[in-house]
Amino acid sequence: MEYPSKLSVFPIEIIEHIIDDLENDIDALTAVSETCHALLPLCRKRLFQSIDLSPRGPSSLKNLSRLLRYNPDIALYIRELKLHLNRSLDNWDPNGPNAYADNILTLSQVQFLQSLQIVGVDETTSYISYASWNALHPSLRKPILELIYSPTLTELNISRFMLPFATFRSCINLSILTIEEMADYKSVDGTVGFLEVPSHPIPQLHSFIVQGVDSHRYASALIHFRGSDGNPTIKFDRLKMLAVYCNYVQDVKVIEDIVKEAGEMERFVYKANTPEGCRGLAGWITVSAFSTLTTLKVVFNMMWFNEHHLQSLCNELDLFPRNNVLEVLDIEMDVPTDLSSPQEQPWGRLDHVLFRNFSRLRRVVVLIFQIGMRLPEIAQRQQFEEATRAQFTWLRENTPVEFDISTNSLKHYIKSLYHYG
C-alpha cells in the first residue's frame, strides 16, 4: 500500500494508532476516510468492526444489504454482529419486500465474524419476544447458520431466541457462550433440520454465562442433550469461567448441575436473587475445581438482604478445603439503611475464615450498596467504611493481601443488577 507523500513522513504504526484513538468517533473516522484512498481501509476497519442490525435505534445499521451491494469489501471488516429476530420473520414472503430479511440474506458475505449476538425482540414495540429457530423461515436459517458455524467465530450470545441444541455441534472454535432470558426453552427440540453429525471434534467451551429467567434450564438441557451419535453437542468439562444467576429457589438444583460440569473452573461468578443467598455453594464445586479456582465473585442482588446472607457466605467459605488456590475474592451486596450498621454484620467472622482457610489469597474486594441513606451520602459512606474496615483485623494487617472495601449508592446498585463483573 502506497501512502501520499504528506503521509510518508509518518510510520504506519503512528497513523494506525491515531485512527485507533478515533474508534468510537464515527464522524471523525468518516471524515478521515475521505481524505485519501490510503486511509480508507484503516478507517473502514474501525467503522465496520461492530455492526448492530436492530430494526430500530440510533446506532443500528438498517441498510446493510444495500451497503454491501455497492461496497462488498466492507463485509471483510465485520468482526462483531448483533442480530435481532422477531416473529414477523416467521411468515416472511421471499417474493415480497422486507429490508430486514434482505439484511439477513446478505450475511453470507461476512466471512471473518468473531462475535455474534442473536436477540429475540418485537420489532414494532421493542418488548420482549421469544423467537424460535423452528418457526424462522427456512431461507433465513442458512445465512445465520453460516455465521454460527464460521471457523472464526469464538463468541456467541443468544437472548430470547430458542436455538436448537444440535446447532452447537458444528461451532468449531466457539469458546464463549452467553444465554439470557430463555423462558421458552421447552419449545426447543434437538434438531436443526438439515444438519448431519460432523466429523470434527466436539467443541469445548472455556467461558459460559447464564443469566435471566429460566436460562439455567436451557443450559441444563443443553448440557444433558445427546446427538444421534450419543455424544454431547458441546463440552463443558474444561470451562475456565462460569457465571450464573439464581432467581428462584427451584433454580438451585439446576445451577448445581451446571457448576459440577466445570471441573477445571478458574473463575466463578454467582449472582443470588433469592433469600437463601449462596447456601450450598461450596458443595457444588468439584474436588478438581478447588485446585484450579483462583477467582470467586459473589453478588447478592436482593432488596431484602439481611445479616443471614453474609453469615451464609462465611459458612460456605469455611467449607472450602485448606488446600484451595483461591487468590481473589470479590463480594457485592446491598444493605438497606436499617441494616447498614457494621456491628450488625458478621464481618469479623469473614475476616477469621479468610485467615484460616485461604493461604493463597492476594486480593479481597467488598462493595456494599447502601439503600435509603439518611445522612448525606458521602458522610454516611465514609462512616460505614471506617467502622466496617476496623473489623477486618487480619486483612488490614496482612500486607501481601490487597484489601478494598467501599460503598455506593442506589443508582449504582441498579446498574449492577444487569452487569456481570
Image: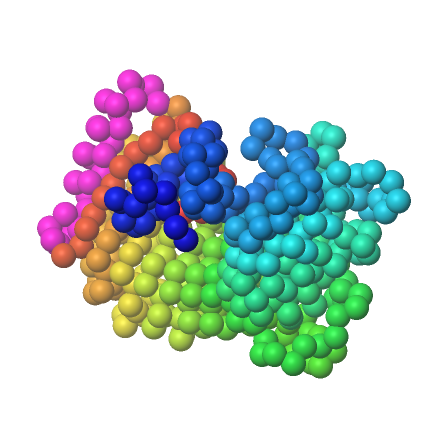
- The magenta stretch is 373-399
Q: Is residue 10 visible?
A: yes
Question: Is 16 left or right of 217, judged from the image as shown?
Answer: left
Q: Where is residue 4 in the image (x, y as percent from the top left)?
A: 36, 43
Q: Position of residue 133 (x, y in %)?
A: 75, 55
What residue lies at 82% left-to-right and 52% top-to-bottom? Answer: 137
What residue lies at 25% left-to-right and 63% top-to-bottom? Answer: 358
Q: Which residue lies furthest to the front in this view?
A: 5
Q: Nearer the viewer, residue 289 or 140?
A: 140
Q: Nearer the viewer, residue 29 or 328?
A: 29
Q: Where is residue 119 in the image (x, y as percent from the top left)?
A: 65, 45
What residue lies at 29% left-to-right and 68% top-to-bottom? Answer: 325
Question: Is 114 left or right of 395, judged from the image as shown?
Answer: right
Q: In this view, does 123 lie above or below 402?
A: above
Q: Main secondary structure of the magenta part?
A: helix
Question: Is 213 left or right of 331, judged from the image as shown?
Answer: right
What residue lies at 22% left-to-right and 64% top-to-bottom? Answer: 360
Residue 398 lies within the magenta run: yes
Quadrant position of residue 152: bottom right
Q: Nearer the viewer, residue 205 or 316?
A: 205
Q: Where is residue 345 in the image (x, y as percent from the top left)?
A: 30, 41
Question: Is 301 left or right of 125, judged from the image as shown?
Answer: left
Q: In this view, does 228 lie above or below 355?
A: below
